[in-house]
Amino acid sequence: MKTLHLLDASSFIYRSYFALPPLETKSGFPTGAIYGFLRAILSIWKSERPEYFVVVFDAPTPTKREGIYKEYKAGRPTMPDPLKVQIPVIKEILRLMGVPVLEVPGYEADDLIAILSGEFSKRGLFVKIYTPDKDMLQLVSDKVRVINPISWEVFDPDKVREKFGVPPQRLPDYLALVGDKIDNVEGIKGVGPKTAVKLIDRFGGVEGILENWEEFQKLYPEAKREDLELSYRLVKPMLDAKVDLSEEDLRIKEPDMEKLRKKLEELEMKSILRDLEKVLRIRSQGSLF
């Protein structure tokens, strides 16, 4: 079966930046995030031998969620300048490698990944999503897997239910009830993971709770209907972004080796260049991709 590999760029870039010791060129340009990110890409290429591979970025503009709720992700620290300057370079290198890159203003990578996984799994492709974001586990199905790039744990529907007590399609209900501190999404006060599972079993999910609000409010008198509605909206992917890609658009293209070699030499990444050339040489022989 054809497999589409979707990579959440931010998670890999942040992890590379904070996990590795500071790296920089002789001229002082920071390279740690670039190096770690490319190492991760090469590792996936070596083990998975992808033909269809898309790296998805958060657009560097305010998101639609921030327009709905200005406190969304408000607690997250500002991106460090040494990391910020590496992101355009990563995008440049990916394009030189022939890797499709996707970002849409106003939308998070999660939204675009949800759109692509939904569309192309319907077209018969198997989808592998690389992200540590638990929100993405709601996309898991018989044709979609999520791989945590930190632990390399692979989530299928059974694994999601084992971890959270609910099937993937009910994960938005679960997250809306318990909240998400990382994204600054409020849940229902007094509702923890076990209680959320019981409430979902009882009411069928957030929509069932809203339809039986009086009954629910007897259990949680301080709960506000509009807060639950907002939380539910925030944890679900926004599927209205314009993403008009064909199957061919998802395919890894031929790299521009001359410019790629020059760029990696400029960044003093001889080992990356050496490994990349090896991978691409195998690809040209038809045994990798």
Image: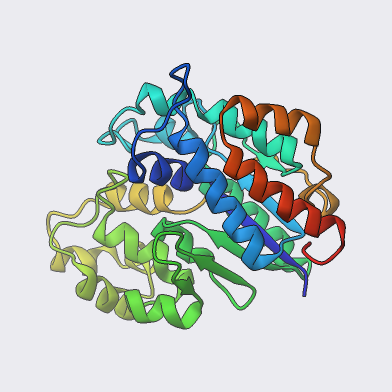
* Relative to 234, residue 24 above or below: above
Quarter holding the C terminus is bottom right
Is residue 245 left or right of 69 when viewed as pictured?
right
Residue at image coords 77%, 43%: 244
Q: Percent from the top left, x then y, of residue 147? A: 50, 65
Is residue 132 left or right of 122 when viewed as pictured?
left
Q: How many marks?
A: 0
Q: Quadrant of residue 199?
A: bottom left
What colour scheme does the image use?
A: rainbow
Q: Percent from the top left, x then y, of residue 80? A: 35, 26
Residue at image coords 25%, 78%: 198
* Relative to 37, residue 123 above or below: below
* Relative to 84, residue 124 above or below: below
Q: Percent from the top left, x then y, of residue 173? A: 37, 64
Quarter holding the N terminus is bottom right
Is residue 207 left or right of 184 when viewed as pictured?
right
Depth order, front residue of 24/61: 24
Depth order, front residue of 224/238: 238
* Relative to 114, residue 195 above or below: below
Residue at image coords 70%, 54%: 53
Residue at image coords 56%, 30%: 268
Q: Is residue 238 visible?
A: no
Is residue 158 left or right of 18 when viewed as pictured?
right
Depth order, front residue of 163/39: 39
Q: Is residue 213 visible?
A: yes
